[in-house]
């Protein structure tokens, strides 16, 4: 029985990984098609940039993070990933003050419109109070923490893009997804794939 459950969990994780990868590819193709109409940009440069996004995302999957990284909330209180009491439906949204503001704002709106989920928001930079005010104005009440730049030590931390990820009980990244500002429906579909996988377990 234990073997059967283990195999089922492994199969679900693999299927969800493939679905997340497919969403990434769709996002890339969508953005490439939209941007290719801009005469001022080189199609070959755009393709290289989007390909790098997928590469960083895939390279950042199934990697263990340090569960004792210090997270600081708006009140200056600290905790660690180990203190958060993770469950299978916890989704982390990772962003920083050097990301494009409109990219982050689109994700805040998508998160606001998503029901029955638990998000943990992790930022880097000196503007955590401004971010907290922005979340409050949108009636978003999920936990917000600040960490140092690149402290998660994931390859995807090297690029200037917000992203989502989930963790298993061993603090290994299971699903890493880079959203598209121009197509927030892909982010919503990413959330749904996680819920479907959790319902199957």
Image (tube, rainbow, N blue to C red):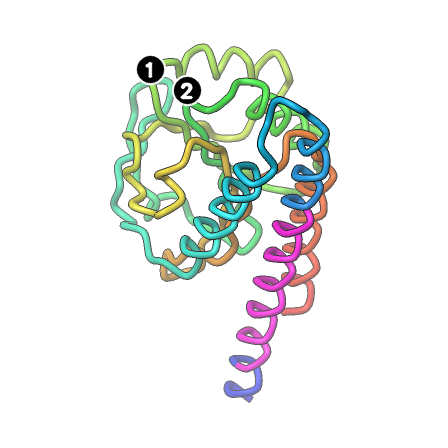
Judge whether residue 144 is colored magenta.
no
Q: Quadrant of residue 140?
A: top right
Apparent side of residue 11 relative to residue 37 in the rendered image (left or right): left
Figure quadrant of residue 172: bottom left
Give the residue displayed 58% in from the left and 32% down from the top. Answer: 42
User: Tag 1: Cα neighbours inside 10 Å, few (<14), some, or many (≥20)?
Assistant: few
Residue 119, position as x, y percentages in the image:
54, 38
Within 10 angstroms of label 2, few (less than 14), some, or many (20 or more) residues? some
Q: Secondary structure at mark 1?
A: loop
Q: Is residue 115 above or below residue 2?
A: above
Pick the quarter of the image with the C terminus.
bottom right
Going 68% across and 34% down the picture, which residue do you hit?
36
Label 1–label 2 contact, CB within 8 A: yes
- Closest to the observer: 72 or 193? 193
Numbered label attached to residue 159: none
Q: Which residues are magenta?
A: 7-26
Q: Position of residue 188 (x, y in %)?
A: 70, 42
Q: Nearer the viewer, mark 1 or mark 2?
A: 2
Give the residue pinned by disc 1: 126
Given residues 23 and 139, the one toward you in this image is 23
13 inside magenta stretch: yes
Q: Residue at x 37, y 56 (%)?
A: 171
Of helix, strand and loop, which one carries label 2?
A: loop
Magenta stretch secondary structure, dominant? helix
Give the residue at x 48% y 16%.
Answer: 132
Count of all numbered marks drawn on residues in the image: 2
Q: Which residue is mark 2?
A: 97
């Amino acid at each position: 029985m234990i073997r059967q459950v283990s195999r089922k969990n492994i199969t679900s994780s693999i299927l969800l990984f493939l679905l997340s990868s497919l969403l990434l590819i769709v996002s890339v193709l969508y953005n490439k098609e939209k941007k290719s109409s801009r005469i001022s940009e080189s199609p070959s440069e755009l393709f290289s940039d989007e390909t790098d996004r997928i590469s960083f995302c895939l390279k950042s999957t199934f990697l263990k993070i340090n569960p004792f990284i210090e997270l600081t909330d708006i009140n200056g209180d600290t905790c660690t990933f180990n203190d958060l009491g993770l469950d299978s439906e916890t989704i982390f949204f990772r962003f920083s003050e050097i990301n494009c503001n409109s990219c982050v704002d689109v994700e805040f709106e998508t998160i606001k419109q998503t029901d029955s989920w638990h998000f943990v928001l992790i930022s880097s930079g000196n503007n955590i109070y401004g971010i907290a005010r922005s979340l409050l104005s949108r009636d978003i009440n999920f936990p917000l923490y600040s960490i140092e730049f690149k402290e998660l030590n994931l390859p995807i931390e090297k690029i200037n893009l917000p992203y989502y990820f989930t963790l298993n009980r061993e603090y290994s990244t299971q699903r890493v997804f880079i959203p598209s500002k121009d197509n927030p429906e892909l982010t919503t579909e990413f959330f749904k794939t996680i819920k479907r996988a959790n319902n199957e377990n």
